[in-house]
Image (tube, grey):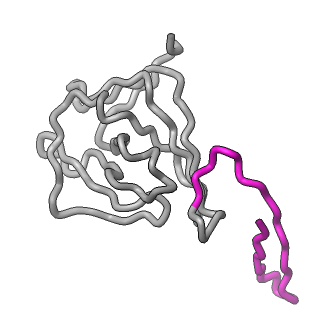
Amino acid sequence: MQISDQQDTGAADVTRDVTFTLPADAIARPENAAHFMRLKPVGRRVTIAREDKPLAQSDRAVWLLEVGRDLYDPVIYIPLDDVQASLETVTDKSSECPLKGMASYYAFEGVNPIAWRYAHPFGFAAALADLIAFYPHQVSITVHAESNG
């Protein structure tokens, strides 16, 4: 892939061609390979709580690492099966990501929203279908020191 970048140097415009190869496990938009993500196992137990109330615990959590218009902060996603709390669907909120699809949002005990997921992601992002992420400013996310089994 080549990316041309016009830079304003105060003089003549400079064009750079950058070539890179996506990692084999990258999930990319077919029409824009420069917008991509990778899912990588956390490899440790992850606990999610809100004011000392446990919401989820998982040994199968993954980091979602995304590059698009920026290098986005990593996000921990966990399997839905590892959520112990009863989350309520937020019916008046949704958003669309060009890489992942349509996001649904969830509330917990008046915290709206507390989490989101892509229940029906684009086909190339199907790995997200059974995962959910929590807003780090709404919960405590602990990645435990001990490694998995």
- Residue 23 lies in the magenta-colored region: yes
Name the residue at the bottom extreme. Answer: 12
Q: Which quadrant is the N terminus positioned in?
A: bottom right
Task: Examine the rendered structure and indicate whether residue 39 appears above or below residue 55.
Answer: below
Instruction: Name which residue lies at 33% across and 57% down.
Output: 103
Q: Residue at x 46, y 19 (%)?
A: 144
What is the quadrant of residue 40 in the picture? top right
- The x, y position of residue 8, in whole percent, is 77, 83
Where's residue 72, x and y in %?
54, 53
Residue at image position (84%, 71%) is: 17
Where on the picture, by quarter, is residue 10? bottom right
Relative side of 73 to 77, left or right: right
Give the farthest residue toward the left: 109
Figure label count: 0
Question: Which is more toward the observer, 27 or 90?
Answer: 27
| Residue 58: % across, % down | 38, 24
Q: Position of residue 111 (x, y in %)?
A: 18, 46
Q: Is residue 135 left or right of residue 60?
A: left
Question: What segment is highlighted magenta in the picture?
Answer: 1-28
Query: In the figure, 88 relative to 96: above or below?
Result: above
Q: Kindly identify the residue that appears in the image at 51 percent across and 38 percent down.
A: 63
